[in-house]
Image (cartoon, rainbow, N blue to C red):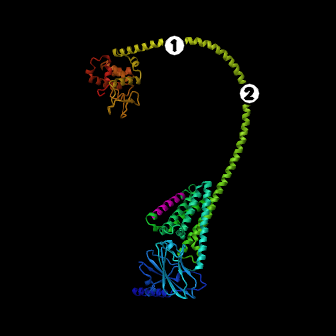
Amino acid sequence: MFKMLLRTAVFLLFLFCFISADAQKAVVFNKKSYEHIFVRGEIVALEDPESKLTFEEISSETYHHKFLTNVDYYPKNYNRNSSYWYRIKVRFEEDLDKSSVIEFFDQVTDYIDAYVPDQDGKYIHAKTGADLAFNERLFKHKNFEFLIKNLKKGDYYYYFKVKSKDRVNVIIVFRTVERFIQYGLTEYLTYGLFYGMIFIFSFHNLLMYLAVRRKQYLYYILYIISVGLYEVSIDGIAYQYLWPQHPVWNEYAYGIALFCISSFALIFTKELLHVKQKAPFYFKLINIVLALRLLFFLLCLFYNPDWFKYKFIEFIPLSVGFITGIYILWRKKYRPARFFVVGYSFLFLGFVIKIIHILGYARHIPGALGYYSLSFGFLLEMVFLSFAIGDQVRILKRKKENAQKQIIKQMQLNAEMQENLNRELEAKVEQRTTEVKKQAIALQQQNETIEQQNEELLLKNTLLQDQSEEISRMNVLLEKDNINLKTSIEKVTDARVNATELDFDEFSQKYPDKESCYKFLSELKWESGYSCLKCHHTNYCNGKVPYNRRCTKCAYEESVLHHTIFENNRIPINKAFYLVYLMYNSKGTISSHKLSDKLGIRQSTCWTYASKVKKVMEERKKDLRGSGKSGWSKIVLDKKA
């Protein structure tokens, strides 16, 4: 049962297609007909997936009924890998005594093969397209035209083969040559006005940038130039005048222009609306969108240029800029944002109308408005963005004028304060002058008194100078006596240290402090010369601690206490010296209690140090024989030293 229903449906569909194709509606023209756009049922189409069908096959009876009636307002090549054959039927009610053209609108169509009938029933083949050099076109026009010469009345079939990498709207238009010339002149004049306005806007803002040096003008100029580049690329004007011999550039120009439009529009938005200060979240969002848009552009440019065709992606940066302007206007009450929002509203509206027109749903919108809606949107946006910049400049000017008024007011206050201060200073100066005059008289009297005193002092100075010379001579003699006396005292002290047992006060005359002890250890330790313990280098410099020595080659610093009996010492060094001295003189028999009384140190500490010294004395008993009283200094150094 299901198979029978399926066969019946297929048969009815085939019958419907057969009847629809066979009964293709003929478009009637007469001498008064000057223009007609073919839509919906006036066009039949046939898809050629492998692009192998020839015109002879297509025009044969076998394929005559295979053409399907177009269901869209304008036909489209939904499968971009296929070729599409389109056929229109024209009926001339009278002899056509003037030349006409068949025109295709979509400038990105790669190849169009036209088979145009003549009055003898033969077909003339003509070829054009965006992938062919511009000078190969019959008419040097941005659109694609095919000439229709004089024909007799009757019915004629026209065949067109379309193949394109982009999805295109196959808009087929019949025009007389007179109408085509009128239309072409009007169109190019409109383009001239449009691009002239772009040039004027750019030049005006360039002058403003040179005058005030605000970056927003520079970004706005780059944005306008990007819009112009996109429009000339899409309209075919760039191909006609800029690179007519290089059709491959058509595949990249509009993509590059769209990237520049998105980027400079968002950068201009950040600069004009001060987004970083007024809306930090949207500032970060814009930066993210800019980075992603750059990534997508690089992928299109170097990986797959076909991705440039996804123009709808520009809806994202457009929306982000639009929403940012609305937020700053609504929440931050920033006045220039109102013109910005209005301008973006027109651009947004033009973008929507353009999409509707491309999809074939804008039947009630005039053709020019629908086809050029995006251009009108760009134009109105540029006007209102200029108003926004002007409004911002007026606000800044108003702020500057207010600031100048405040400065002038403050300067007047400063001038009044300066006058009052000058009056006060003049009064104080006058008062001070009177005081100074009085002081001058008093000083003059004092100077006279001082002159008299100076004369007396001169006489006294002469006497003092004589006395000073005598005192100096006596001091020289005393100094010599002191040097001799000091030397004698040191000799006596050394003799007493080596000869008898001294108390701590007498011993301290020889080693009064830490520095004298360190000096003695340094001379004793390096008596035979310095040699680094690490690298055996013999040159040194002073270390961080007095009498330490630092190697100039490896920077190793050797302590003066290292390899001595005083290493890791925890009592004052001069007392440690005296302890060693007492232990040596007593040959180790002095008790720790007596050492504690003499040194003022705890008995346990004295016992620990005395044990250490006594052990060293036992180990060096042979070395200390015959050393006399001065042998105590020989137990200071370790044998390693």
Given the image, on which type of amino acid does mark 2 rest? Thr
Which residue is nearer to you in this view: 156 or 514?
Answer: 156
**Magenta region's main secondary structure?**
helix
Residue 294 forms part of the magenta stretch: yes
Given the image, on which type of amino acid does mark 1 rest? Ser
Residue 564 forms part of the magenta stretch: no
Question: Left or right of 191: which side holds 168?
Answer: left
Question: Left or right of 310: which side holds 464?
Answer: right
Which residue is nearer to you in this view: 14 or 164?
Answer: 164
- Identify the disc placed on residue 269: none
Q: Which residue is mark 2?
A: 434
Q: Which residue is mark 1?
A: 472
Tell me residue 236's x, y (percent): 53, 70
Tell me which corner region of the image, top left, top right, bottom left or bottom right, holds residue 455.
top right
Which sits earlier in the primary sequence, circle 2 or circle 1?
2
Q: Which span is picked out in magenta?
A: 282-299
